[in-house]
Image (cartoon, rainbow, N blue to C red):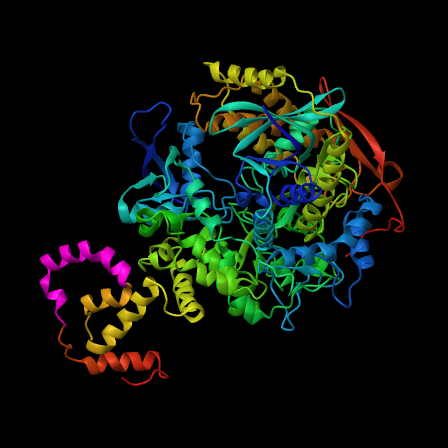
Amino acid sequence: MHRHDVVVVGAGLAGQRAALAAIEAKSDVAIVSKLHPLRSHSGAAQGGINAAIGKEDSVDTHIYDTVKGSDYLGDQDAIEFFCREAGPTVIEMEHFGTIFSRAPDGSLARRPFGGAAFPRTIYAADRTGLALLQGLYERLGTESFTMYDEWDLTSVVVHEGRCQGIVAFDRRRGSFEEIAAKSVVLATGPCGRVYGRTTNSHTSTGDGIAAAYRAGAALKDMEFVQFHPTALLESSILITEGARGEGGILKNVNGERFMARYAPHVLDLASRDVVSRAIITEVREGRGFPGPYVHLELMHLGKEKIESRLQEICDFCRTFAGIDPVTQPIPVMPAQHYMMGGIGTNIRGETNIPGLLAAGEAACVSIHGANRLGGNSLLETLVFGKQAGIAAAEHAARAPAPSVDPADVAKDAATVDAMMRRSDGEEPQHLRIAMQAAMDSKVGVFRLPEELTAALADVRALQTRYERVRVVDSSKSYNLNLTDALETGHMLDLAEAIVVGAIARTESRGAHSRVDFPKRDDANWMRHTLATRGPSGPVLSYAPVTYTRWEPKERVY
Amino acid sequence: MAASTTSTPFEVYRFDPSKDSAPRYDRFTLDLPAHTPVLTALLKIRTENDPSLTLRYSCRSAICGSCAMLINSKSRLACQTPVGPELARHGKIVIEPMRNQPVVRDLVVDQKPFWDRYRKIEPFLKTDARDPMPVGRENPMTPEQVDRFHETPRCIACAACYSACPAVEADPEFPGPMALAKLYRFVVDPRDKDSKNRLVRIQPEGLWLCLRCHLCTEACPKDVRPSERIRDLKEMAIAAAGVSEPGSRHAVGFKDNIAEAGILNEFKLVRQTYGPMDLLRQLPQGIKVARKKPEILKKPDPIEGLDEVRAIYKALDPDAEDR
């Protein structure tokens, strides 16, 4: 048995920032992660981090852009707090050692991004996530804390209405362990791998979101799934919005700059939901290339600009698609990219369970509402990671010692034991692939009621099959097949919550685009979806959106 | 757009120390388009053939650094290596765990030694209270100053360089290419207030153990070019601390020797490299070598074409005084 004041699960930007804040507040902190911190998916973020530090820009404009981008589903008090923290957060990361790209005068360079009125996105070439992850990891490395890396989270432990710690599986030793804690911060990232066509890493399986949901936490706005307009064909590797920020142009099979018809003012730099819908519409109406796909052209930017500002993109295109973006257009299609929804929290990262907190993409505060703006997610990890760390340390300072029960570990161990002893059963990877196929084909950019209903039936059938999941690998040492099984179980629960939320929401808002309800319906749907786990699936309820200064308007780009 | 596929044989290293007495190689044959990344093939094996095949992987886009392994004996990222060229060159694809790190299971290695050596270089920005950072704004840094990092910020800590490095294998004191490239990143950082001390400290702590074989640069999937950064560190270390270490004395002595005669005077070089105490310690080895190769004790005759050698020196360093 292990015991700490604060346990942070996940070691990406949100988790590390939470840990740092809790350490600075004098808590005894442990980080539990299935990956080494530098292997976290935060490192894959490319384009940049928003802060209205330019002379022409203002915090109010950043707030307005974020509110508008969210299609008025973001909580305005949270967005105000978030945008005010942006400047100090970026400066702090610079002071920690992050190597940002610079303007000729030595200040932080900024690039234009979709949905933003001014160039507001601070960047490190096209590897901003990696630069921030390195800077924060190096800073955190000067502090003392306990690291449990390559441990899989299996349960959040709740007794007496309070969070008491977690149960996790130590891959190296092959054992289940309880880690008792007064506060637990879940910063485990998204569940993008419920989709097959996703820009997310293979390990983005929503383990923390699922564990919170199973422990009684409410999930918020799970139906809002962002599809990034420009993922590389076939591999779905992300081509940053920064490519369009630097001047890249989308074209259809006729060579037409089609965004002129969808967003006449800002063209290719419209909000992501708008651009993704435009691409899918072009393809459906026969103006895509056979594949299907559309072109992202960078050639006119010139070799020097492409190779200096979009270095990783050049490498990706050359390595993974055999395309040289200096001389050839890049074939792209929208792919799942970001979960606006997640574990419902307030501004301090607190959930509906005392002692359980969440931050980063695993959480939903909500800043992004129905659609996230590019450059706001890296900022979110740091701003709300820090808040969650502070709140976790405060809670730990006044909470009683956690009460744990040997049954907590025994339960998870028994579940897995049954999987390993099953001589005949379902392969976890086969269930995962079937789930991804259902989500890709039926819960995409445009949503039809009959497809959503069919997807729910598919997911529930897979949940039934999952009851007979088996782990064929019998080894105690680094049993990845066991991880496959745990992750697939987590994702099936979350896929169900996404689809149930999407069926219920009979309007189109941000990234949730219902073909049968094409308009936003503020009278009935200006509210957050909350999903809690019932005996036969998610039970939905709704919560109001917080408004301060910005009245809902039609969203035009 | 279905690409044509080719029958692609794989031989994959398998070893579970908790069960197996010795490693074995499992054979799989897959029909794959030539551009398929090795990682995709390995995941196909996990899904379709053997779910117990164990490896580290995450992002599949060469940014998380998880999937470094030996592919036909070269340390590479599996996600970044297409099967086609490997098959064309080797007729099969042999997959093994990285070198210089003990095997945990199959392709998963224990990276603790790698991280331990990395931590030894103190990989964090060192500030100085007497020279504080600006309040409420960023430290100014010009694009030219950012360029001085070269490609070191691209490092994804995959350890391919560490796996490829013979000095890592030979000497536990050697920090390794990644750690030294990281050290370089801090040394050139205008915000770091300990750059000079870092250069002084690293000399006895392994900087000169690099063999200059450049295998790290060949292995690096992100073009960080660790060996070039190590070379830069050596130059900066001499500039900062003078020629005070056996390593730097050896490098400078080597250079002077060649300038003098166009050929190495090995006996002289040993004397130039080591101080009297170290020289004594080297004596038994020296005697052994001198017995086998007595000519090393003799001053070699200058080579023909010494003028040309000197012309090269002159071209490389026009300001150097004439000999």
Q: Percent position (x, y) of residue A308?
A: 53, 65
Magenta part, dominant SS: helix
Magenta part of the chain? B276-299
Instruction: In the rendered view, tell whether residue A454 sits above or below residue A106.
Output: above
- Report whether B299 appears left or right of A134: left
Quadrant in the rendering for residue A443 = top right
Q: Percent position (x, y) of residue B67?
A: 44, 42
Q: Percent position (x, y) of residue B181?
A: 45, 57
Can residue A293 be seen by looking at this rendering? no
* Magenta-span inclusion, residue B298: yes
Residue drawn where x is 27% and y is 44% of the image: B91
Can residue B56 be seen by looking at this rendering? yes
Which residue is farthest bottom?
A: B322
Q: Percent position (x, y) of residue A394?
A: 76, 37
User: B170 and B158: which one is in front?
Assistant: B170
Quadrant in the rendering for residue B7 = top left
